Image: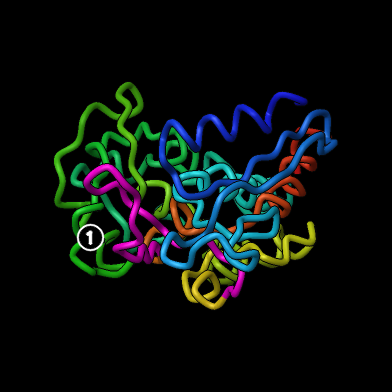
Amino acid sequence: VAELDGIAEELMKSSGIPGMAVAVVKGGKVLYAKGFGVKDVRKGDDRENRVDTDTVFQLASVSKPIGATVVAHEVSQKVIGWDTPVVEKLPWFGLSDPAVTRMLTIGDLYSHRSGLPDHAGDKLEDLGYDRRYVLERLRRLPLDPFRISYAYTNFGVTAAAEAVAQAGGRPWEDLSEQVLYGPLGMTSTSSRFADYEARPDKAVGHIHVDGKYEPLYKRDADPEAPAGGVSSSVNDLTHWLSMVLANGSY
C-alpha cells in the first residue's frame, strides 16, 4: 500500500491518462483511497479540477457487479431467484429459439451463457435506440448452444435486471437506489446518466486521439444502465466493497 502513490503516478505518466482514483479495501476495511490528476484536461491543474476520492466517474462495466449485488439482495429477500425464467417477469421478451426463451433464467443472462452473440444489441444502442427497443430485437439474432457457450452481452444482463425490477415493482434505477445505494450511504452513486451529468464534482470521459486524451464525446449508457450505466465515486465504492468483503453477501 505504501508504494501505491508511486505506482499510480508512474501509470499516469506512462499512459497519459488525465486522472484516476484508487482505493484498496481488505477484509471490509479501507486501507487506501486517493485521487490523481484532473477531471477535464480543458480546465488545467487548478484545485477545483483535481480528482479526489469524491469525484464521480462513469463506471462502465463495473456496473455489472454492482447490479449483481442488487439482484442478490432481491434473491435473498425471495423476490426472485437466480433460476427464475425471465419470461415469467417479462412476457414480451424472447430469443430466436422458443425453447431457449422458456428456459432462460436470470442466472443464465448474468453468466453470459444464453447463446446470444457477443455484445448483442450494442450497435442498436449506438444508433440511439432505447432499452425496450433493443431488448425486443434480441429475438432476431441467431444463437449459439444454450448454456454451453459464452459470449459477453450487455443487453443480456440488462434483460435479467429488467426482470428483477419487474418482480420488485420498481424501475431498475429506483430499485438500485432503494436497496443498495441508499442503505449503504452511497450518496454520489446513481444508475441514471442525468444524475451523473448534474454532479459538480465529476470526471468527464476522455478518448485517446493523436497521442493524447481529449474529452470529445459524452456516453449516455441509460439503455443498458444495469450493465454499464452506474456512476460513482471511489469513496462510495469502498462502502460497497467493504460490505461485500466483510459479509460475503448482502
Closest to the observer: 155 or 4? Answer: 4
Q: Is residue 215 magenta?
A: yes
Quarter of the view holding residue 119: top left
The quadrant of the picture occupied by the N terminus is top right
Write the start and end of the magenta stretch as one range. 199-221
Based on the picture, tell me whether residue 67 belongs to the magenta stretch. no
Label 1 neighbourhood size at 10 Å, few (<14), some (14-19), many (20+)?
Answer: few
In the rendered view, tell whether residue 194 sits above or below residue 133: below
Instruction: Give the vertical position of 92 relative to 21 (above or below).
Output: below
Residue at 51% from the left image edge and 69% from the top image edge: 192
Q: Residue 194: horizontal and vertical position, in percent?
A: 49, 76
| Residue at x-position 76% and y-position 34% | 25
Judge left or right: residue 209 versus residue 35: left
The location of residue 85, given as percent across then percent down, is: 45, 46
Q: Element type at marker 1?
A: helix
Q: Is residue 69 left or right of residue 153?
A: right
Q: Which residue is mark 1?
A: 126
Q: Amino acid at mark 1?
A: Asp
Numbered label tally:
1
Say whether residue 95 is left or right of residue 242: left
| Residue at the image point whose x is 75% and y is 65% from the top | 182
Residue 56: x and y, percent? 59, 60
> In the rendered view, how is the structure colored?
rainbow
Judged left or right of residue 194, residue 74 is right
> For the stretch drawn in magenta, what is the main secondary structure?
loop
Seen from the viewer's position, the closer of residues 49 and 24 is: 49
List x then y, in percent, for residue 26. Answer: 79, 29
Q: Quadrant of the C terminus?
A: top right
